[in-house]
Image: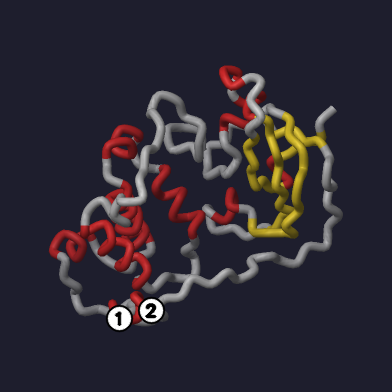
Amino acid sequence: MDGIHDVGGKLGFGSVKTTDEDPPFASPWDGRMLGVARAMSRPSDWNSDKFRHTRELEDPVLHLTRPYFDQWYKAYACMLVGSDLVTLDELASGKSSGASPIGLKPPMSAEAVSKIKHLSPSFERPYEGKIRFNMGDRARARMISPTGHCRLPAYVRGHVGKITAYHGAHVLADVSAHNHTCAEPLYTVCFKLGDLFPEREGSVDQVHLDLWESHLDAAE
């Protein structure tokens, strides 16, 4: 959706400054929250897109002022209640009523979470349609103002870029967030930085975005 939660391009927040000495987490509880999230057992209707959409429903002021992993906590709490996996009383007390959700495996142990290996599986899906764009084609990001989840950043809409890669068909995040499944061709589109941000006119820098076919129109 369009709002403060957009996936990039907001002005006035300054640059992100980091150093090699920065700790992996700002506070110890941040790492614990990440561990809790990885240990959770998830129902079949949960996915990363739904998680992002749930965070987007947060009040804009709270979104800007809450710590990052505090947002995670609130989003997962809302999803747990929304899926009838926990009650508000259980969340408030921090204690289970003793009832086990039907059809879910028990959560992972802390030891098991620490041994998780980061894999790079393929998420490509079958697709029988004909792709609309080829390498080198010019494409214009669509001018849309969606009310639901959208992975097309507002700052790129209406601008023309060039197709630089095709990744096969992947589940469209925009509908996956709302518990629907639709696979579409996914492309990498290259935009000139100066086209997106006039104050950077003449820059040699580029912005590469992975965008689905429904995000794009053929450039005239």
Q: Residue most toward the left? A: 93
Residue visible at 53% across and 42% down in the picture: 148
Label ID, residue 111: 1
Residue sitting nearer the eye, 199 or 45: 199
Q: Dot 1: few (<14), some (14–19), or many (≥20) neighbours within 10 Å?
A: few
The answer to whether residue 174 is above or below residue 77 is above
* Quadrant of the rendered image containing residue 122: bottom right
Element under label 1? helix
Quarter placement of the C terminus: top right
Label ID, residue 115: 2
Residue visible at 31% across and 51% down in the picture: 21
Q: Relative to 44, is 218 on the left or the right? A: right
Residue sitting nearer the eye, 39 or 180: 39
Element under label 2? loop
Label ID, residue 148: none
Whole-number angstrom distance, CA of label 1 to CA of label 2? 7 Å
Whether residue 205 is visible here, answered yes or no, is yes
Image position, residue 8 (x, y; %): 50, 36
Image position, residue 143 (x, y; %): 66, 29
Image position, residue 16 (x, y; %): 39, 37
* Quadrant of the rendered image containing residue 67: top left
Image position, residue 49 (x, y; %): 51, 54
The three-letter code of the residue at mark 1 reads Glu
Q: Relative to 216, is 65 on the left or the right? A: left
Residue sitting nearer the eye, 116 or 98: 116
Residue visible at 77% across and 36% down in the picture: 139
The three-letter code of the residue at mark 2 reads Lys
Residue visible at 33% across and 39% down in the picture: 63
Q: Dot 2: few (<14), some (14–19), or many (≥20) neighbours within 10 Å?
A: few
Whether residue 157 is visible here, answered yes or no, is no
The answer to whether residue 116 is above or below residue 214 is below
